[in-house]
């Protein structure tokens, strides 16, 4: 079965810190995605990538950047964390075709104090 | 961009009843409509999906219907069981997916 692994389940950071959220998938998927999930707001797309070194902005990219140096790894970067970035962050991947089942990681609950 | 509205936000039913969750979307180019179930503390899991060339799809107690003219699609769960209790998300898109805000379904024994 496809495994999407997020490095941390819980993370507590201070305002202004640079934060790295890591995601690794083991099924050679072309596409990787970062979503944030907030109560009552559903899942919102931050950034996605269709290939190594390629990135595209999603619906809410402000305050975030991403890195995809290797096919299996997709990192989300908060350049200067703010309290409004406290959220659950979900990484997902799927194969080459974009209209395919998303495989989600277990999520990282980030608290910015 | 795409906008997906999902109703209701919460739904309480008795075990054995049917549950219906409805979604509307705005972008007529969307051609893929999945439904995800997220149990408390777990990751979202795909339960059923439908593509724009199909009007209805069924998988055991779960069915999805799509009306492309009206731009709405619905999830139907029959003979609900307590283990169906979860948050359900609809989504729509053609390259990336836009998700609805979710419906918390509570099935009481």
Image (spheres, rainbow, N blue to C red):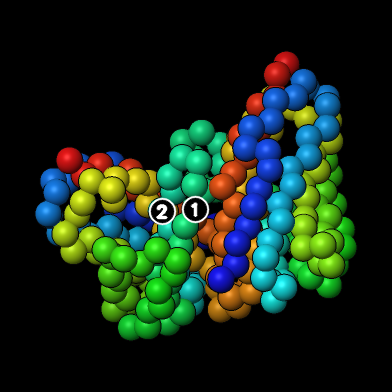
Image quarter hosting the N terminus of chain B: bottom right
Of B89 and B83, which appears nearest the observer? B89
* Residue in the picture at 75% in, 24% down: B13
- Image quadrant where residue A17 sits: bottom left
Image quarter hosting the C terminus of chain B: top right
Q: Is residue B74 visible?
A: yes
Q: Residues within 10 Å of mark 2 (few under 14, many from 20)?
A: many
The numbered disc on residue A43 is: 1
Please state the chain letter of the residue tagged with numbered disc 2 in the rendered image. A
Q: Taking A50 as reference, is A88 left or right?
A: left
- Image quadrant where residue A24 sits: bottom left
Residue B82 position within the rendered picture, expressed as x and y whole percent measured from the top left: 69, 25
Residue lying farthest right? B55
Q: Which of disc 1 and disc 2 is earlier in sequence?
A: 2
Of A33 and B97, which appears nearest the observer? B97
Q: Pointer 2 and pointer 1: residues touching (CB < 8 Å)?
A: yes
* Residue in the picture at 28% in, 69% down: A65
The numbered disc on residue B103 is: none
Please state the chain letter of the residue tagged with numbered disc 1 in the rendered image. A
Q: Is B35 drawn above or below residue A66 in the view shown?
A: above
Of A69 and B54, which appears nearest the observer? B54
Q: Is A16 drawn above or below residue A71 in the view shown?
A: above
Q: Is residue A4 visible?
A: no
- The residue singled out by tag 2 in the image is A36
Residue A53 position within the rendered picture, expressed as x and y whole percent measured from the top left: 33, 83
Residue A106 position within the rendered picture, expressed as x and y whole percent measured from the top left: 43, 47
Residue B36 position within the rendered picture, expressed as x and y whole percent measured from the top left: 62, 50
* Residue in the picture at 16% in, 59% down: A80
Residues under labels 2 and 1: Cα distance? 6 Å
- Image quadrant where residue A90 sits: bottom left
Q: Taking A62 as reference, is B67 left or right?
A: right
């Amino acid at each position: 079965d496809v495994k999407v692994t997020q490095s941390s389940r819980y993370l507590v950071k201070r305002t202004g810190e640079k934060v790295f959220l890591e995601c690794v998938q083991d099924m050679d998927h072309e596409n990787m995605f970062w979503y944030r999930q907030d109560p009552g707001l559903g899942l919102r797309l931050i950034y996605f990538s269709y290939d190594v070194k390629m990135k595209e902005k999603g619906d809410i990219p402000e305050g975030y950047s991403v890195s995809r140096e290797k096919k299996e790894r997709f990192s989300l970067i908060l350049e200067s964390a703010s309290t409004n970035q406290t959220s659950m962050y979900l990484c997902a991947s799927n194969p080459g075709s974009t209209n395919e089942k998303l495989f989600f990681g277990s999520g990282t609950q980030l608290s910015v104090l | 961009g795409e906008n997906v509205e999902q109703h209701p936000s919460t739904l309480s039913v008795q075990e054995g009843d049917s549950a219906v969750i409805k979604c509307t979307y705005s972008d007529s180019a969307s051609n893929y409509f999945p439904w995800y179930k997220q149990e408390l503390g777990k990751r979202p899991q795909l339960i059923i999906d439908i593509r724009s060339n199909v009007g209805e799809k069924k998988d055991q107690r779960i069915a999805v219907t799509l009306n492309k003219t009206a731009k709405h699609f619905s999830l139907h769960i029959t003979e609900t069981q307590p283990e169906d209790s979860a948050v359900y998300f609809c989504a729509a898109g053609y390259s990336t997916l836009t998700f609805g805000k979710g419906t918390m379904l509570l099935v009481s024994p």
